[in-house]
Image: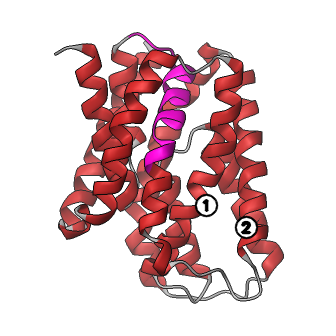
């Protein structure tokens, strides 16, 4: 398949997955790596290229958006921006061989978080969590978003559904705003550093715009369980391939 077409299809699919529940990086990483990009560059291209689609999806979810009690959106957005920028700086400073060694572990952690999310929600044990703790959790998740970001959306939904009174649907609407915020800060640094090649990024961006919008509206009709199992299978397979690639 033509490289440009393959990347475009990848961008559409990944943006649609992100708008529904996450897992888009499990699609972009193997394709971009297959076309010769390094691990850090492939991750940066995915972050920049899928950002506009994520913003469109956030707009589609705007009517369901609500902050935490006692913790407004400005504070959450500020922490997300700072954390995303910090994660991007860490990625830019990470040598490619080191990131390639870390990549399979990051994919495995993201896949496990994706797989365990429903089980965590069923615990329904509400801890007493204050605003400072929630901001600290969001800071850690935002740094992870800027550095790698795989599965971070489902991590946010799982954590917030577990330790606050928000339903998974309400938490999902909030992560649709905060994940793109962290990615926006990271994307700016990736572009300034030249880590994200413009050719691959532009194709992914254009296709991701359509995928993000359609995913937020049409893909909600798909069976969530079937899509979740598909994302877990992709993540597990990708982690296995990455372990072989990194350590053999």
Residue 229 in view = yes
What's the magenta region?
A: 36-53
Above or below for 61 versus 153: below
Above or below for 13 versus 70: above
Give the structural element (helix, strand or loop) at label 1. Answer: helix
| Residue assigned mark 2 | 76
Quadrant containing the C terminus in the rendered view:
top left
Quadrant containing the N terminus in the rendered view:
top left
Expressed as whole percent of the image width and height from the top left, the position of residue 238 reads: 34, 33
Expressed as whole percent of the image width and height from the top left, the position of residue 224 reads: 24, 67
Please give the name of the residue rendered at 73% of the width and 67% of the height, measured from the top-left corner. 76
Above or below for 144 versus 41: below
Colour scheme in the image?
Answer: secondary structure
Q: Nearer the viewer, residue 145 or 188?
A: 188
Say which mark, if any, is on residue 178: 1
Compared across the picture, whether 75 is left or right of 239 comes to right
Expressed as whole percent of the image width and height from the top left, the position of residue 230 reads: 23, 51
Q: Quadrant of residue 147?
A: top right
Please give the name of the residue rendered at 23% of the width and 22% of the height, measured from the top-left corner. 5
């Amino acid at each position: 398949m033509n490289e440009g077409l393959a990347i475009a299809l990848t961008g559409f699919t990944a943006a649609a997955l992100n708008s529904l529940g996450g897992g888009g990086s499990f699609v972009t990483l193997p394709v971009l790596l297959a076309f010769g990009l390094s691990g850090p560059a492939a991750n940066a291209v995915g972050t920049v290229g899928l950002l506009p689609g994520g913003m469109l999806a956030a707009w589609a979810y705007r009517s369901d958006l609500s902050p935490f009690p006692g913790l407004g959106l400005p504070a959450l957005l500020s922490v997300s921006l700072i954390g995303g920028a910090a994660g991007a700086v860490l990625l830019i400073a990470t040598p490619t061989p080191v990131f390639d060694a870390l990549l399979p572990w990051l994919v495995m952690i993201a896949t496990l978080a994706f797989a365990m999310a429903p089980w965590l929600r069923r615990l329904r044990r509400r801890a007493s969590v204050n605003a400072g703790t929630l901001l600290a959790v969001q800071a850690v998740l935002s740094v992870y978003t800027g550095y790698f970001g795989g599965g971070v959306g489902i991590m946010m939904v799982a954590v917030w559904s577990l330790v606050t009174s928000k339903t998974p649907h309400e938490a999902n609407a909030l992560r649709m705003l905060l994940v793109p915020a962290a990615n926006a800060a990271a994307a700016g640094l990736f572009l300034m550093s030249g880590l994200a090649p413009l050719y691959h990024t532009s194709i992914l961006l254009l296709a991701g715009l359509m995928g993000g919008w359609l995913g937020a509206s049409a893909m909600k009709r798909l069976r969530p369980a079937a899509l979740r199992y598909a994302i877990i299978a992709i993540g597990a397979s990708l982690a296995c391939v990455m372990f072989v690639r990194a350590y053999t």
